[in-house]
Amino acid sequence: MALTDVEILFVEDDPIFRHVVADFLQQQGARVQQACDGNEGITLFSHAIFDIVIADLSMPGLDGLSMLKQMQVINPAIPAIVISGNDVMSDVVDALRLGASDYLIKPIADLFIIEQAIVQAMHSAATPMNASGQSHLQEMNDLSYQELTDNLYLLEQNSHAAKSVQQQLFPASHIYYPKADINYSLFKNNDVSAYFIDSTMVGDHHLVMYMAHFSPEDNSAAFGCVLLRSFINQKLKLFRNGLSNTLIEPNSMLSYLNDRMVKSGLHISTDIIYVCIDLTRYLLSIGQSGKGLRCYLRNGNNLMPLALPESAPLGSAHWSKPSMQIRTLLRDEQICIGTNYYEHKQKLLEDHYTGLVYQSDIKAGGFIQLACK
C-alpha cells in the first residue's frame, strides 16, 4: 500500500470527519495520531516523530495556521498539508507562504485525493539524493490537478475572493533585508492585478526577487500568484534542508517553473524576470521568460536596460530555455525590473514606492528595485 508505515499527525476539530479520514488512511497502511485542536497537535508533534502533518486551518483555540508556525520552529523539515473551507482562502495563502506542500478544500468527496497529496508532499520533501547530489526520483506535481482546477473555478467566479487572496500575497512596499532593501510599486486598473512581485532571502548569502505578468488578465491571475508562490516555496524548503540549489539558479528555476505550469493544465501564460544576487560578491544572475517585462541597472537618475533576448513565456509547451545574463552589481547601482512604460519609469526615478494600489489613470504595471546596503 502507498502509505505503509507512514506516520501521520492529523489535526482536525470535526470528530466525524477526523475519524473517517483517519480510518481511511489506516486502511491504506499509515499510522495516524489524531488531535482535536492546535494545542493538542503541538503537544503530539513535540513528543513524536512524524512523516507528515495534515491540519485543518479553522479550529477553535489555537488555529491551524498558528499551529503550523510553531511546528516550523520545532522541526521545519516535516511537510504539511492544509485543509480549508472555501471561506478562508487567505489562510491557505499564508500556509503556502509558511511552506505547506499542498492544500485541500472541503468537502473532500474522494478520500484518495488525500492519499495522493500525501504521496506527492513526501516525495517533494524527502527525495533521496545520490553522491553527486542528483535526485533518484522524478519530481512529482506539487499541487494536485483536481485541487488546482477546483480553486481556479472558485476564483474565476468570485472576484471578491480573487482580490482577497491576491492581496494576502503582496508584501509591504518597503522590505528591509540585512544586506539589501526592496522597494516596489504596482498599479492595477481592476480588482485583480495581472502583475505580481516577491522576494526572499535564500540562506545567509543569497537574495532572490522576481516580477511576473499573467495572461489572461482576469481573476485567474490571482490563482497564478498562488501557484507561482507555492512552487517557489517548495524549492525554498528543499534549499533549507540542503536538498536543492535550484532556487539560486535562475536558469534551473525557470525551467522548473515552466514544467510545473505546463503540468498544472491551467493554461496560464507568465512573463517573468527572476534575479538572484550573491550578496558576498554582489554577483547578479538574471533569467527572463517572455517579453513583457524589462530589467534595468539604475545609477542615480539613469536607467540602463539590460540586453536579454526574447524567449517564450512560462506555461508554453514550446518553451525551450530562458534568456540569461550574469554580471556584477557595481557600487551605487540598483537592479530594477519593470514594465516598459514611460510613466512607470518616471515614478521609479522619483522613488515613488506605494506597493500595490488601484489607480485607474495609470497603465497597469509597475516596478521593483533592489538596492544593496
Image (spheres, rainbow, N blue to C red):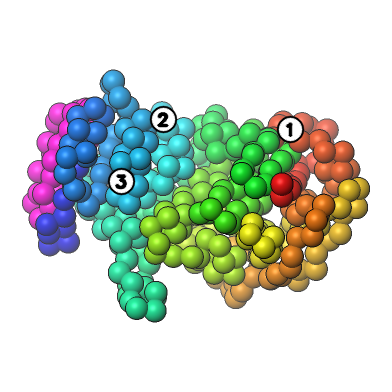
> Marks 2 and 1, how far apart in space?
27 Å
Badge 3 amino acid? Asn
User: Disc 2 marks which residue?
Assistant: 88
Residues under numbered marks 2 and 1 in contact, where contact means CB atoms less than 8 Å apart: no
Assign a secondary structure to mark 2.
Answer: helix
Left or right: 109 in relation to 201: left
User: Which numbered disc flags the more N-terminal residue, 3 or 1?
Assistant: 3
User: Which numbered disc flags the more N-terminal residue, 2 or 1?
Assistant: 2
Residue shown at the point (64%, 53%) measured from the top left? 210
Residues under numbered marks 3 and 2 in contact, where contact means CB atoms less than 8 Å apart: no
User: Disc 3 marks which residue?
Assistant: 75
Residue shown at the point (80%, 64%) measured from the top left? 306
* Residue 354 disc label: 1
Assign a secondary structure to mark 1.
Answer: loop
In the image shown, does 356 or 316 lie closer to the viewer?
A: 356
> In the rendered structure, which segment of residues is drawn in magenta?
11-37
